[in-house]
Image (tube, rainbow, N blue to C red):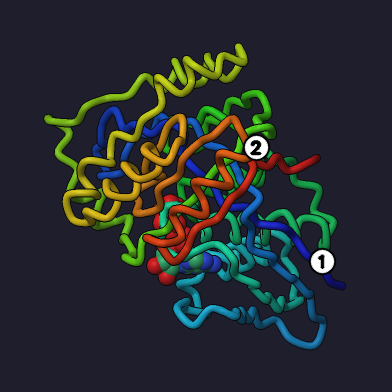
Amino acid sequence: MEISEKAPAKLNFSLDTPFRHLDGEPEWKMVMISIDLADYVHIKTRTDTNQITVRTDSGFLPCDHRNLAFQAAKKMQSLAQTHEGVDIYLDKKIPVAAGMGGGSSDAAAVLRGLNKLWALNFTLEQLAKIGLEIDSDVPFCIYSRPALVTGRGEIITPLKDLEHLNLVVAKPKDSVSTPTILKRIDYEHLTHQDVDGVAKAIMEDDYPQMIKKMGNTLEPLTSKYHPDILKIKQKMLSFGCDAAQMSGTGPTVFGICRNHSRAVRVTNSLRGFCREVYLVRPYSLKD
Ligand code: ATP
């Protein structure tokens, strides 16, 4: 039996970390949205072996237990108490180590896919709980629709769809290691964000307030080591985006335009400075 699942990338419209837990894990407060830049995860169950295999068209990714899609399959295999194996093929479109949650979204797609193939009937809430053991972004990726995300990533409050917005996404050539950035956070000197204000503006369809309140607490930290981030952000703003900021722990930068033709202009102008530029829309996974 086989199935293909779409695994959309995510962006952080607002990102803050109020404190670090005693075990070293950050507490999160974020507004996250999914976008229609997506990996496609092809999953096939096998009765002739209990092995899990992962293949991908990306040369940079480990295909063993370090791959988050592999970890997701392993968890489902054990919960299903099955001797069936799984072949996974990752058709990667989301840049790796970019702050767009590609690995987490692949893992969420495997959880959703195997839930259907093995008729396990877990609810999305249950899948999100299983996903949290893999990575803090997996619970959000299970739903893949706009949300306020708090706790260690497990408290998901749905927000209104934003499908009318135009988003220009630029991935600078550097890759960023999320654990390295998280270790460098100096909680004494963080500038915090009005994350609730962004969530409220989305719920009230208040675009000017959303733009005004957006921000990423980690942007000054990552851009200290990757100065291209601020250069691209400045270009996005000067080319006409209504707002621009880094996503996740970076280095991806995105800009927002309400007007589509302006977004096309910004995209074309940016291509002279950055090789990987995408013009995308927010995306909400349907039930
Ligand atoms: P986040 O914003 O959640 O920190 P990211 O976009 O910065 O995510 P990913 O692309 O998810 O980062 O990859 C981070 C690391 O995870 C990479 O170094 C990669 O080797 C590893 N990884 C494991 N599985 C995957 C996968 N299926 N796709 C991408 N990366 C994966």
Residue 268 sits above or below residue 46 on the image:
above
Q: What secondary structure is marked by label 2?
A: loop
Quadrant where the C terminus is found in the figure: top right
Quadrant where the N terminus is found in the figure: bottom right
Tag shown at residue 145: 2
Residue 177 in picture, x, y percent from top left = 31, 61
Q: Which residue is mark 1?
A: 3
Tag shown at residue 148: none
- Answer few, some or many: residues within 10 Å of disc 1's Cα (few below 14, many 20 plus, some between 14 and 19): some
Q: Looking at the image, is mark 1 or mark 2 earlier in the sequence? A: 1
Q: Is residue 96 left or right of residue 53?
A: left
Residue 64 seen:
yes
Cβ of mark 2 under 8 A from ligand 1: no
Residue 39 sits above or below residue 249 on the image:
below
- Answer few, some or many: residues within 10 Å of disc 2's Cα (few below 14, many 20 plus, some between 14 and 19): many
The kind of residue tagged 1 is Ile
The kind of residue tagged 2 is Arg
Q: Which residue is more in the foreground, 230 or 76?
A: 230
Q: Which residue is more in the foreground, 162 or 41?
A: 162
Instruction: Report ligand 1 position as a quadrant.
Output: bottom left
